[in-house]
Image: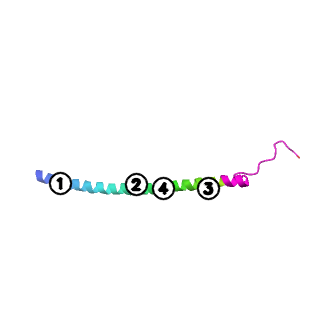
Amino acid sequence: MSLCTQVVAQQAVITKLQAADRMRQAAITEILAADRRSQAQFIEALKLLKRLHTQMIEFERQQGPTKGPAQPDAPEEAGSSS
């Protein structure tokens, strides 16, 4: 194989590698953009959760603690038999 043929073949390989690298860089850019969007959504969800928690605390201050399946009525005094 002549030197000229080898150079042309290597240039073709370099061109293919450059194209693959551009595609890889574009994919990474898209992934980073999606990650930024996900982070923004997560931060917004945390803010909403904090706001809800604050509202629940304020509600409990005004109304007293809520009772439900997770917080049943307190049992009678232990040892009291009537």
The image quarter containing residue 63 is bottom right
Q: Which mark is residue 32?
A: 2
The spot of residue 61 in percent (x, y) is: 70, 52
The kind of residue tagged 2 is Leu
Residues packed near mark 2 inside 10 Å, few (<14), some (14 to 19) or many (20 plus): few
Secondary structure under the numbered disc 3 in the rendered image: helix
The earlier-in-sequence mark between 1 and 4 is: 1
The spot of residue 35 in percent (x, y) is: 44, 54
State left or right for residue 78 relative to residue 50. right
The kind of residue tagged 3 is Leu
The earlier-in-sequence mark between 3 and 4 is: 4
Which residue is depicted at the point 59% across and 55% down?
51
Which residue is depicted at the point 24% across and 56% down?
16
State left or right for residue 54 relative to residue 62. left
Looking at the picture, tell me which residue is in the foreground, 76 or 43: 43
The spot of residue 20 in percent (x, y) is: 29, 56
Looking at the picture, tell me which residue is in the foreground, 21 or 40: 40
Q: Distance between the residues labelled 4 and 2?
A: 12 Å
| Residue identifier under label 1 | 9
Looking at the picture, tell me which residue is in the foreground, 26 or 59: 59
Magenta stretch prevailing secondary structure: loop
| Residue identifier under label 3 | 52
Q: How far apart are marks 2 and 3 (CA)?
A: 30 Å
The spot of residue 1 in percent (x, y) is: 12, 51
The kind of residue tagged 1 is Ala
Boundaries of the magenta span: 57-81
Q: Distance between the residues labelled 2 and 1?
A: 35 Å
| Residue identifier under label 4 | 40
